[in-house]
Image (cartoon, coloured by chain):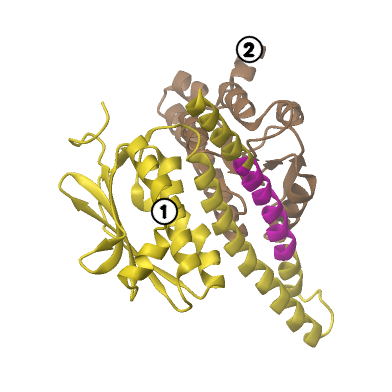
Chain colours: A yellow, B brown
Amino acid sequence: MENVLRDSHLACVGKLLAGFTHELKNHLAIINESSGLMADMLEMGKGGEEETCRKFQKITSTIAERVVQANVLARHLNGFAHRMDVPDSVFDINELLDEELALILRFAKLKGVSISSRFQGGLPSVDSNPALLQFILFALIDSIISRLECAGEINVITLESGGNVQVRIEVAGATPEDGGRIFHKDLAELIRFAVKKINISFDGPVDKGRVRFTLNIPSAGGPGAPC
Amino acid sequence: MKEMKVLLVDDEETFVKTLSERLEMRDMKSDTVFGGQEALHFVDDNEPDVMVLDLKMPGIDGMEVLRRIKKRYPRIQVIILTGHGTDKDEDEARRLGIFDYMQKPADIETLAERIKAAYKTKVQDVMAAVAFAEAGEAETAINMVTTKKEKESE
């Protein structure tokens, strides 16, 4: 029952988020067309004096840039929301990380932490619970951001390893003590419970003297994949 | 040369009117309607060459409009322009024979270019029918250019 409740809750949140992003896209479309019309009119010389025209052109170009940025964000949020549609599915881990990192970036920026990614191309799809996997990745990266000093750096790497797809989250320059603070007792308990629930293996917080979290996710059809 | 007839269908009135105005600035006149039912009535009276259609609308939604249009007027070229579409929606729309599938907000130049390309496709279809007629394949030619509605009224 607990699982049913949680899945329903996640599906509800997902639905709400998807609805929000859909509506946002409608608003963006209107802003886009309105500023576009303004730009068209200015181009045709209907804007009045030359100086005014230049100012309007600058404004419309700013609006257009913001629309593009907001649209990228809405697309990522929409993708994130739809991950909750089904408990288990086959998906591309690089796409999942792309959309999640785009949403986390703002939190990192506020703390002066940079996030870089190195994704291996042509990875096999993975078979897992995308919403829970997103939660695990979010919880780890969020804890790193919260406990890392300014100007820290997080590297997110994907690669194929022994029939699995591996996700590594490395924290540049962090000490094993930092690793202990990032992966505190409560988080450790939660993550270990979650990875067990979706049958993926996990290592961390310290690997060969540096702070690194590793998730091994079964590729679709691979030896570790669910039947 | 016959002027291209474009129909824009979207329940967001501000959006569709502004879009129409911008297309007109690019020498592309268009009619606008704000719902699925209205679109179907409009097409019955004034068949467009190209229809730009939203998917999520109150009442008869865009997918249902597409289904009915493709059944009755298969030669109308339809471009889906939506902010709501999922991959499943896109697959279904493509299966039903759309010309293109675009996400909102769309770049006006790209949209204008796709509308022109859709119109060109329709003209080519008609020209192919003419070629069949000239080659003595009258029945094939008639089938290519006659809509279900026209066949029913014969």
**Most common secondary structure along the magenta stretch:** helix
In the picture, measured across the screen, residue B58 lies left or right of residue B67, that is: right
**Where residue A110 appears, x then y in whole percent?**
57, 71
State the residue lying farthest toward the front: A185
- Pointer 2 residue: B152
Nearer to the camera, B3 or A101: A101
State the residue lying farthest toward the left: A162
Chain on which label 2 sits? B
Amino acid type of the residue that numbered disc 1 sits on in the rendered structure: Lys
**Where residue A99 appears, x then y in whole percent?**
46, 54
**Where residue A90 appears, x then y in whole percent?**
34, 36
- Label 2 to label 1: alpha-carbon separation: 74 Å
Q: Is residue A171 above or below residue A126?
A: below
Determine contact: label 2, label 1, CB under 8 Å: no
Amino acid type of the residue that numbered disc 2 sits on in the rendered structure: Glu
In magenta stretch: residue B64: no
- Pointer 1 residue: A185
> What is the secondary structure assignment of the residue under circle 2?
helix
- Which residue is depicted at the point 18% across and 51% down? A161
Chain on which label 1 sits? A
- Which residue is depicted at the point 67% across and 73% down? A62
Nearer to the camera, B138 or A22: A22
